[in-house]
Amino acid sequence: MKPLGPIPPGFAAIDGELAIGGYTASALAAEAGTPLFVYDGALITARVAALRAALPERLGLHYAMKANPFAPLLRHMARLVDGFDIASGGELEMAEAAGVPAERISFAGPGKRDADLEAAIARGVTLNLESAREAERALAIGEQLGKPPRLAIRVNPDFDLKGSGMKMGGGAKPFGVDAALVPGLVRRIMASGAEWRGLHIYAGSQTLDAAAIAEMQAATLALAARLAEESRAVLPACNLGGGFGIPYFPGDAPLDLAAVGDALGAQFSALPDVLADTAFCIELGRYLVGEAGVYLTRIIDRKESHGEVFLVTDGGLHHQLAASGNFGTVVRRNYPSAIATRFGAPVEEEASIVGCLCTPLDRLADKGGFPRAEEGDLVAVFCAGAYGASASPAHFLGHGPAAERLVNANP
């Protein structure tokens, strides 16, 4: 029997069923159907409040909307955070539709098309430039529009985030401008008459090691100071990146947020003069929304093969690619999951939860311990609030997307 990942705090049982934001899984499924993603807005609000309490007051909080662009969730998030970080023209349209002002949006990502640059410049969005060539294109488009662009530089740092699930800095990368080339590009931007907005330095994501995050943030601040001095320019703003992880797998422990906040507070108290007036922020996606989401899928067949039990559901990897182990995981491990309609019941059997797709890759839990489940029971896959619905191949084999719901979204 293989262990399951830890179920996040904030979930309870009502009459033997999983409750999400006070609503039973069966009530939610009856209203919206399955498969279904449910996001608890109250858990998101609480997570933002915990961050505000633990981190220095000076630090702004941005939402990386690639984690989850569900429109009601974006509107909820817009009331909670200081800015939105986007990575496409499509995300710009979604952020605008959620009521996020352009001055609170920054746009990173390689391969921005001219249409993307034009839309961002016309609206007054800050562009995080990924190359010198992109800078020249942005300046030319700004001249055509008669509007100076708001330009920051995404830096490819000489370090990465130790222990991160996805390294975004250090060595050759398609992201950002190599640190050695940044000062020259800063001077080019300032000489052009564009509005200089600062630096974006993102070294990695998804770590649970507070010491590694503190080390990365210290290195980021030192790099920002050095680049500001070498550029001979005031640094108006600096995005310190993210990297805050959530527990997905057996043995994972939550990030020590207080330790991260204490370390950053100490670093802020000893900033060099060149950073004295710099506005700092971090950008977080999964840490804000990941643990607030649950994926509900219904068992449509219970079968045995060579002595093994398979619970076949109406969902699968086309909605939860990461939980299936097919989203960059080297060794497949089980996400937290449960039989939602028998939540808290004792383990009775070993079973694998699989989806409805005609591929052996479609496995949501491998040989986990569950109470006995039958056709009609609901399965819950936790940590489904980030990189689920929009990061999975929803149209693979023609099954289509899952429904999505946000509960407890009152301000």
Image (cartoon, helix red, strand yellow):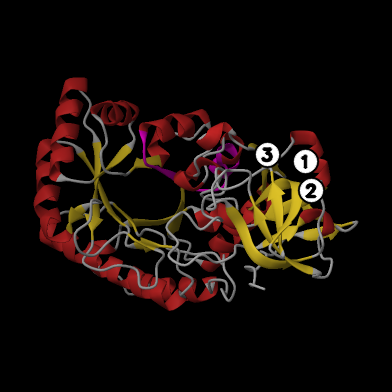
**Badge 1 is on which residue?**
29
Judged by depth in the image, the label closer to the viewer, 3 or 2, is 2
* The magenta stretch spans residue 86: yes
* Residue 25, numbered label: 2
Amino acid type shown at disc 2: Ala
Q: Which span is picked out in magenta? A: 74-88
- Of callouts 1 and 3, which one flags the residue occurring earlier in the amino acid sequence? 1
- Of callouts 3 and 2, which one flags the residue occurring earlier in the amino acid sequence? 2
Q: Nearer the viewer, residue 89 or 316?
A: 316
x then y, percent, for residue 226: 18, 66
What residue is shown at x 30% (from left), y 70% (from top)?
271
Neighbor class of circle 1 (other Cα within 10 Å; few <14, some 14-19, many 20+) is some
Pick out the residue farthest to the front. Answer: 306
Do tag 1 and tag 2 residues touch (Cβ < 8 Å)? yes
Helix, strand or loop at disc 1?
helix
Quarter of the view holding residue 75 = top right
Amino acid type shown at disc 3: Arg
What residue is shown at x 49% (from left), y 48% (from top)?
67
